[in-house]
């Protein structure tokens, strides 16, 4: 669950308009956030909703179950692998999945990540069951939108993109416009956060004194995480990408992983 907890509803939005809109849902381990967008504009936002709400068709979050033009549901992974598209074959997904050590309570999903990479990832069956209310065919790798948004922003090789959750870190790097690195890590303290960012920089032959960090997620100026990162890296900035237009009171970096789902397609579940 994220630290920030934004709520927003456009005063002109009503349930009858939903058929012209897109529903975006970003699922976590115990909670989820969702947004409704229309004409590239945010109309509704709710964060940190208990997963149990997905079993209710009435109440505060009944708009989840309206009819939408499109639904995109980002699912959290419990392990993943990227496979070059040139090597991927649908009939070999089970073979690739062996590297993920899939447990009895996990399900494997495969989908195209970008023009060069297929992602194969495992998801807790409890999460799958909760998300099935939206149709599993509408689910995507949770980080896919974030990756797509950054890929389209002319990312520089000396830049690391960090998406910070309360206890999870995702790191992304591109070179020559192509995905070079993506991984996620669990952390507990700001020192562990710095360790993982520095470790990745070293693995990519990036010097911290020349490397810019661009942050999204649970990141705000002056917090303990950003202060600590700034002690080790050349520059720390905020990710101001806006896949949809936002009201002024919602910082774009806080909701980027959710709003960037608007860029995604769907997956194939096994």
Image: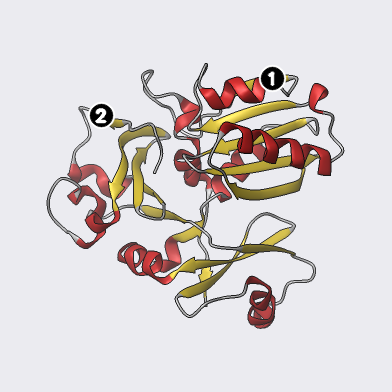
Q: Which mark lies nearer to you, 2 or 1?
A: 1
Q: Is residue 101 above or below residue 69?
A: below
- Residue 152's tag is none
Report the residue marked by disc 1. Answer: 231
Which residue in the rendered view is the most extreme toward the left? Answer: 59
Q: Nearer the viewer, residue 199 or 106?
A: 199
Report the residue marked by disc 2. Answer: 10
Q: Is residue 153 left or right of residue 248?
A: right
Say which residue appears at 71% left-offset and 55% top-offset: 115
- Element class at badge 1: loop
- Element class at badge 2: loop
In the rendered image, residue 264, in percent from the top left (x then y), is placed at 52, 51
Q: Is residue 28 left or right of residue 5?
A: right
The N terminus: image quadrant: top left
Say which residue appears at 49% left-offset and 74% top-offset: 107
Q: Is residue 160 left or right of residue 50?
A: right
Q: How many numbered discs, if any?
A: 2
Say if mark 2 contacts mark 1, CB within 8 Å. Answer: no
Residue 155 appears in view: no
In the rendered image, residue 70, in percent from the top left (x then y), is placed at 38, 53
Q: Is residue 35 above or below residue 234?
A: below
In primary-sequence order, the first of circles 2 and 1 is: 2
The image quadrant that residue 113 belongs to is bottom right
């Amino acid at each position: 669950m994220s630290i920030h907890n934004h709520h927003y509803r456009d005063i002109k939005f009503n349930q009858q308009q939903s058929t012209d809109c897109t529903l975006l849902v970003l699922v976590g381990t115990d909670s989820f956030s969702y947004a409704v967008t229309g004409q590239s504009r945010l109309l509704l936002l709710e964060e940190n909703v208990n997963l149990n709400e997905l079993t209710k068709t009435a109440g505060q979050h009944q708009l989840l179950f309206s009819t939408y033009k499109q639904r995109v549901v980002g699912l959290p992974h419990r392990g993943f692998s990227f496979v070059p598209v040139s090597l991927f074959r649908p009939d070999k997904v089970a073979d690739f999945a062996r590297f993920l050590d899939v447990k009895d309570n996990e399900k494997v999903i495969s989908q195209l990540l970008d023009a060069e990479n297929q992602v194969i990832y495992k998801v807790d069956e409890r999460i799958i069951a909760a998300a099935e209310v939206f149709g599993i065919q509408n689910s995507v790798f949770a980080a896919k939108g974030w990756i797509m948004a950054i890929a389209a922003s002319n990312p520089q090789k000396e830049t690391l993109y960090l998406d910070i959750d309360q206890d999870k870190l995702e790191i992304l790097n591109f070179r020559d416009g192509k995905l070079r690195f993506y991984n996620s890590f669990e952390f507990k303290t700001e020192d562990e956060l710095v360790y993982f960012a520095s470790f990745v920089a070293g693995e990519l032959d990036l010097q911290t004194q020349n490397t810019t960090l661009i942050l999204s997620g649970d990141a705000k100026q002056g917090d303990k995480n950003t202060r600590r990162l700034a002690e080790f890296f050349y520059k720390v900035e905020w990710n101001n990408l806006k896949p949809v237009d936002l009201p002024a009171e919602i910082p774009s970096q806080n909701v980027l992983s959710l709003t960037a789902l608007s860029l995604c397609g769907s997956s194939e579940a096994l």
